[in-house]
Image (tube, rainbow, N blue to C red):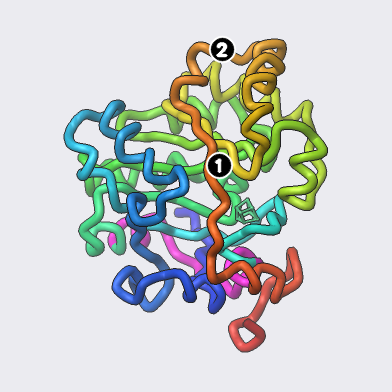
Amino acid sequence: MHTWKVVPLSPGQLLDVRPDDILNNGLYRRCSTYRGGGGYDKFPAIAARHFGGDEADYSTQFIVQLFGCNLDCSYCYVTRAGVWGDFERVTSDEMVEAFLASGQKVFHLMGGAPALQLPFWQELIATLRSKSPGSVFHSDLMLTERDYGATELSAISKTRCLYAVNIKGLDAEEWLKNTRKPLDETQFWKNWKSVQDAGLPAYVTFTGVSRDRVDSFWEKASKHSIDVSHWQGDSFVIDLIAYEAAPHVDDAPWGAVIQRSQK
Ligand code: SF4
């Protein structure tokens, strides 16, 4: 069984997390998407459309933050210390047991960049399904972490799974400004097309983008064989929120494992 690298909440991030929402001594957390606002609050309505039931069923999530990210966003509320922190190794079984104990219905595998571990999602989803068939598996795709394989995508296109395709800039310049990493446009469009071809249940978020250029972005997407009529309806812009963590984003170096004593 795969062992996941899970990073506990960082000191900067803890400034924004309510004590009641801290789970397992900070290894996991609970998140109310309504309270978070900024666009994240659209998740319950999207989930209810996909799976039925009341929006309230999907308004809170159990959150796991995996180690590592290919990006380095200047607004990262997880903070570098949270993305690159001293991780704990956890099996899929252990994660799902913690999820069950939390009483939540939505399991959100977050990062960092969870799709760096895409080949292992299948195992986690199978474990979740066997122990909690009615729960929802949710995770994030940024289209740039690695090449997505058709087989691994088809393996995660399952019942009661829902994915966010998170777009961090409408062009290479805006992407670089937001993420402090260059955009590989070839990989971006190729991965999006692969997600589309696999029929993944997914919606689109835009973070830190110029709202007045979103329409022209969709025109560009159609030229890259993206089915705009399919994607555009379930897409929205996420507002940048003034998190208390903001002054602490760069407290640690990018890309190095940060020992707890240094955080
Ligand atoms: S994608 Fe950006 S905001 Fe998300 S964890 Fe990575 S650096 Fe932070």
Q: Residue at x 28, y 61 (%)?
A: 97
How many marks on residues? 2
Q: Is residue 233 above or below residue 133?
A: above
Spatial CA span between label 1 and label 2: 23 Å
Magenta residues?
Answer: 80-97
Task: Give percent across and percent down for residue 166.
Answer: 57, 38
Viewed as shown, does residue 208 lie left or right of 45? right
Which residue lies at the image location 28% right of the left edge and 27% below the top edge?
49
Q: Which residue is identified by label 1?
A: 118
Helix, strand or loop at label 1? It is helix
> Can you tell which mark lies on residue 95?
none
Q: In this orientation, which residue lies closer to the viewer: 118 or 105?
A: 105
User: Residue 173 appears in which quarter of the rendering?
Assistant: top right
Classify residue 80 by image quadrant.
bottom right
Q: Residue sitting at 38 percent across and 78 percent down?
A: 25
Q: Could one spot residue 121 in this view of the protein? A: yes
Residue closest to the eye, 222 or 116: 222
Provide the residue designation for mark 2: 227
Mark 2, secondary structure of its residue: loop
Indicate the quadrant where residue 162 lies: top left
Which quarter of the figure is the C terminus placed in?
A: bottom right
Label 2 within 8 A of ligand 1 by Cβ: no
Q: Is residue 49 above or below residue 260?
A: above
Could you say where residue 187 lies in the image, as x and y percent from the top left?
74, 30
Observer-side mark, 1 or 2, equals 2
Place of residue 44 in the rendered image (x, y in percent of width and height, measured from the top left): 31, 40
Q: Amino acid at mark 1?
A: Leu
Vertical placement of residue 151 versus 175, above or below: above
Magenta segment includes 83: yes
| Residue type highlighted by circle 2 | Asp
